[in-house]
Image (cartoon, helix red, strand yellow):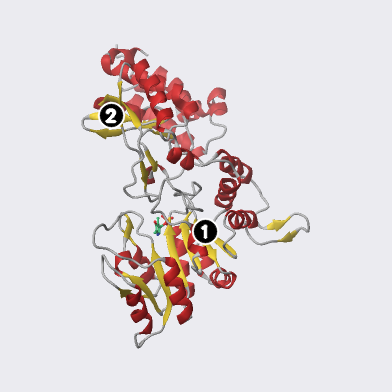
Amino acid sequence: MVSPDPRRLIPGTDTLLARPHIRDASAGLSPHVLRHIITQTQQRARQGRLAPDQVETEVLSRLVSYRPSTMRRVVNATGVVVHTNLGRAPLSEGAREAVAEAAGYVDVEIDLNTGRRSGRGGGARRALLAACPQAEDALIVNNGAAALALAAAALVGTNEVVISRGELVEIGAGFRLPELIESTGARLRETGTTNRTHLSDYVSALSRQPSEPVAAVLKVHPSNYRIAGFTSSVNVRELAALCKHHGVPLIVDAGSGLLNPDPTLPEEPDLTSALADGADLVIASGDKLLGGPQAGLLLGSASIIARLAKHPLARAVRTDKLTLAALEGTLNGGQTPVEAALHIDPDTLLARAQRMAEALSAEVVPHEGRVGGGGGTEVPLPGWAVRLPEEAAAPLRAVHPAILTRISDSSCLLDLRCVPEAEDDAVLSAVEGVLRALRDPTEELSK
Ligand SMILES: *Cc1c(COP(=O)(O)O)cnc(C)c1O
């Protein structure tokens, strides 16, 4: 007698689809996801990697644990506050609430009093102006790069824009500001040198017999690098006076979106000061030091904002309702997680690290946090970290939520600066689990 091919015992797709508990578990899923999970599981059984009578249970368990988005929550234990690879700024409670409210139909472009169409996202714009009263008006676009491109397109066109050679910077990997500006059709009139640009350089750039007229002067904050030593640059106030004299607007790309001066970051430009010093237009990102969603903020004189809003490109870089909600929630809500992480008291950090280290029989070491992609280049943020064996880093990334640490000097450093204190216990028990599994690999399997 020949024993039947076990593969014939694998339940068919229609059989599985007809099972009530499979139908229940897949209620919120798209049919193609459901079919994919079923075919994959059947395939594993065909290859002998799963017993045919396990197929149904396996499909069910995969359906139950299925998450509609592949993006996974990460606990940022790196000590880098504005971490570009982790989505820059985590949203505040106020911003999260606003996003949840705006997820459905929302009055983003209608006045519910009159029932008429209204300006888009007026609440976020008003919140921005309230937070930065130096500005006459504001416009919100998709990100800082979009804001800069719009400003170049609308204010410079195919004319020239004056910029110091010390400010022709590459911001992120492959994102070169001068290339972005030129891609809009604007042409750069470079002035000064890499390390030193004087007021007289701007004077001669503006007075040079123009083949084409100069339409604006742009000052860029070189967010991610510093030139030290024999350097000089011209401040916003001096440049603004010169621009006024020549009748051209001064655009300041401040980068990080700090609303007001912050003594922790003495070199970081802020929007209020730049406007008070006479900039006609200030540009910044929403998700760096402002601690909000990805957005490009344009603040300045009413006439310039009106020119930007009228330009066709404004429609192409328009923000969605979720961004507008998150930005308004950030500005009107309490302290942002970015602000909290930047200003956390090192002693508090030490006490939290010590408590965790004691429970783990680990040691606490000094560890400097970083501002990160948002600015504050080279500003050290004194703090502490729990030192774990380097082998812990990979399994910590595999738990849910993932825990991202910093690997340095053959250690895995767990810095609590950017971890909300309320999550300390959850992080501790995840680390305990990982360390236990490292000491005794069978433990993980028997769990
Ligand atoms: C970050 C930055 C940008 C780009 O802003 P995104 O929001 O990342 O598009 C432009 N200019 C400066 C000075 C920056 O620091």
Taking the spot 45% from the left edge, 76% from the top edge, the residue there is 243
- Whether residue 342 appears in this view of the structure is yes
Q: Which residue is mark 1?
A: 272
Amino acid bearing label 2: Cys
Above or below: residue 316 compared with residue 266: below
Name above or below for residue 347 compared with residue 254.
above
Mark 2 is surrounded, within 10 Å at the Cα level, by few (under 14), some (14 to 19) or many (20 or more) other residues, namely many
User: Are the two marked residues, 2 and 1, in contact with CB atoms closer than 8 angstroms?
Assistant: no
The spot of residue 390 in percent (x, y) is 25, 27
Q: From this viewpoint, is residue 168 visible?
A: no
Say which quadrant the N terminus sits in: top left
Q: Quadrant of residue 214?
A: bottom left
Q: Residue at x 31, y 48 (%)?
A: 378
Residue 312: x percent and y percent? 53, 71
**Taking the image as four quarters, which one is ligand 1 found in?**
bottom left
Residue that numbered label 2 is attached to: 412
User: Which dot marks residue 55?
Assistant: none
In this rendering, the answer to whether 326 lies above or below 7 is below
164 with respect to 292 (left or right):
left
Please provide percent x and percent y for residue 16: 49, 26
